[in-house]
Amino acid sequence: MGVDLWDDATWRRVVDEAEVLVMTPQILLDNLRHSFFRLKDIALLIFDECHHAKGDSPYACILKEFYHPQLNSRPSDPLPRIFGMTASPIYSKSLHPASYSKQISELENLMSSKVYTVESESALSEYIAFATTRIVYYDGSITPSDSHNHIVCCLQRLQEKHLEVLEGSLYGSSLENAKQRISKLHRTFLYCTANLGVWLAAKAAEVQSTKEKLLSFWGDKVDKNVEGFIRKYSEEVYRELAELPLTYLGIPLTLRRPTRHIGEDFTADIQDGLLTSKVHCLVQSLLEYRHMQDLRCIVFVERVITSIVLESLLSSISQMSGWNVKYMAGDSSALHPQSRKKHTEIVDSFRSGKVHLIVATQVLEEGLDVPSCNLIIRFDPAATVCSFIQSRGRARMQNSDYVLLVRRGDAEALSKTEKFLASGQIMREESLRLASTMCQPLENTLCEEDHYCVESTGAIVTMNSSIPLIYFFCSKLPFDEYYRPLPRFTIDKALCSCTLHLPKSSPVQTVYTEGEVSVLKKAVCLKACRELHTVGALTDSLLPELGVPWEEEPDIVVEKYQHEQPDYYPEEFVDNWFSFSRLGIYYCYKISLEGYFKTTVSPTDILLVVKCDLGPDFVSSSFKLCGAQDYVNVAIKYAGIIHLNQEQVTMARRFQATILSLLINTDQSEGIDAMKYFHEMEVTMGIVYLLLPLVSGKVDWCSVKFSASQVYEASNKDTKHCHSCKEVDLLQTKDGPVCRCMLKKSIVCTPHNMELYAVTGFLELNATSQLHLRDGSAVTYITYFKTRYGLSLTHKNQPLLAASKLVEVRNFLHKRHYYENKKESCNSYAVELPPELCRVLMSPVSASTLCSFSIIPSAMYRIQCILLSAKLKVQLGPRMQQFVIPALKILEAITTKECQEEFS
């Protein structure tokens, strides 16, 4: 509706046309402060959930800033009658009966109203259905202490490990943010382990690790690079917790059942610490209502993460099939926040019967009216009397139940529950006892020095509203995508002073005040509001002056900031493959990669083939890319022109598409699908260039030609050997017999574990050779693969392949701290593979070529940025072109500090 932007005339028209207005208390408070209408215009004020009228809440501010000052100073002026509604006038954690009278009196005095109620609950039960309260007891945790301690130590070790990684990778606010989030997640995982069980703690880690990714592969959103570290931490916690039940919880090897699913054997789950007795009690309590038709149940929990993992658990239990389970949490939650629209969808589905069970935090304790709700379960105890009563009131159907889970033997929890149950009658008795007592007026709710009032309109700004008004004023000043006007505060606690610095476009630049340290920011903002109104920057309604005279044109046209910016590509690379393949003549640039690498393999040179000259900046240039513990110097040099026919371009394109698809896509199936897609020649526009491996300064056409063959198709009989072998020596693979030459220097996949490996040669071992395990024992490769994967090796005399996991694709565009003096070798571990378990995806391809193509994506992205910088220099006009400024220097000038590059 945009009510925040309505002016005085709009509100006046709405008030004149309507007899009843329904709004949030904050909107009413804002309108009263801006004097769009006054209390005398209102005949009746109805406050829903009026127990919120306390402290500096909107309800309380309406009464303190407007109602009581008028009641005290002008009692003869008309005031609205006040009608408040609440299920509990007590809104605190105190359960002492003596405090009830004091709190009820304070609420009555603030609202200038008396509490009306009945003598007993039985009087209400004639008109309203009350749920029957049941207390269900559950046993404490039976997880062995040594197992629990091991889990705690494991989580502590992972936290320390990832905090140490952060120290060398992030800086400033990003580092502090990441530390706080990992520490908070650590506490969350500990809480889940102790209160829900290892299984649900692992689920919590999985949920956090699979949140929507905020980082793209190339790091174009580096301001959110914290998410990558958080995800890695959560992923490792998930892996550790997922394996703990079978490894560390004392389950003998003979009794391990890795195929056991959650909920199949609750007794074993509880004994192993996979689930807690409390969770089991919840499940059993729900199953008691399995026979009920049209179940509508709400399970109240304390934490958001509990609601998320319990939704997953209850949805997966076979005995509850047919029940649709959803969770609800506040929209400010850091874990999977939900919008108001999502809340409305869930509640509507609950009303209609499409959703049967909601696991919710306190967000659902108020405001939901579902007459058909017939079961409420408090998984976690209520924090306040009000929370207890409000949650019980959600069950509106006849014969509904209110189930409370209490740990057996917990005298404190049982006593608290009994006090909650008795609180309703105590509140009624205290309210009736105070019925004859008159409300006392509140004095000095709005002191002269605590507010500023415009005499002509009656608009008012108080200490409580001064800071939001200053921020709102700054938000209306000129801004663009590079600058957001915000106030800045300088507080000197020793001198008890505060200086407010407003943006340069504000007519008032600085405001100074002295006073009590706790209210300095409020006081200086109140003073600034007074000065801004005096100079006309705030209207008589105390709103920013937004009008621009017709005879004046604004100096700056401000467009709305777009968070998602378009991607730009250098025109030298933009084309379609169909036309590119028919050019015939191409420009070549040799890319040399040197530096300190995490692998002992040295990268080969790469030839960049493009459609046109890249300009003087690429005749001979270089730049540096830095990683965590390594770096690479990239040198580019013009190498002349080359003649290629359409067939050669097609082969080259297939080669680079294949090798990059396999290196970038860690999922085997995704990589193969990408290979098939890129083997087609598109006619649509895109980024077009060729990357060819060089051997001794010449293009390695042998690798390009045969690696580009579609070896992933088992029906292709021409790929059994490379046609250059003098003698064909076939070895049996997953797709049939293949020549030795096709296996040596190849990329293979192993379907049994869905992994990709780089093969470097053959070993003097076969399937009957001994494999030495980590525990010191030795078995044959036949026995190992049969035991581990259930695979039978039939070609026992075939030599094993010497292989290693594919080199990790490096993204040097994310900021990483590196140590030039700390040269650690991080080679991929070697494995021995039986040929009959392998499927050849690409051959031949050397380790040096793989190393180069793992770095080349980052290098090409930097080259694109340099080309765009050179284009910017041209666009700046002749005046800029008269200076000899390398494109790399222009890139340095437009690179922000947040990118954390060495030259930024």
Image (tube, helix red, strand yellow):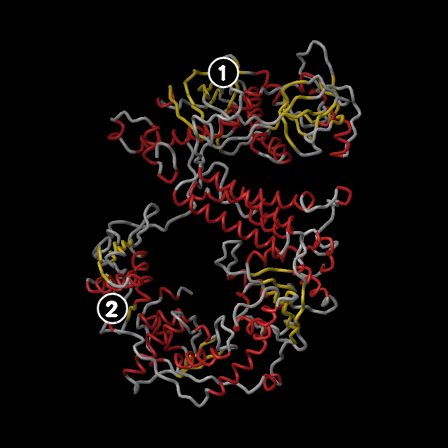
Q: Element under label 2?
A: loop
Q: Amino acid at mark 2?
A: Asp
Relative vertical location of residue 487 with respect to residue 699 in this rendering, above or below: below
Q: Is residue 534 left or right of residue 560?
A: left
In the picture, the disc for residue 540 is: 2
Q: How much space separates mark 2 and mark 1, taking CA atoms?
A: 76 Å
Q: Which residue is at the front of the view, 488 or 583?
A: 488
The residue shown at (27%, 74%) is: 447
Q: Amino acid at mark 1?
A: His
Q: Which residue is mark 1?
A: 643
Q: Is residue 454 left or right of residue 303?
A: left
- Residue 422 in the image, given as x and y percentages of width and height: 57, 78
Q: Element under label 1?
A: strand
Q: Residue furthest top?
A: 726
**Quarter occupied by residue 54:** bottom left
Q: Which residue is at the front of the view, 898 or 591?
A: 898
- Residue 157 in the image, given as x and y percentages of width and height: 55, 42
Local crowd at mark 1 within 10 Å, few (<14), some, or many (≥20)? few
- Residue 675 in the image, given as x and y percentages of width and height: 61, 30
Q: Which residue is at the front of the view, 280 or 494?
A: 494
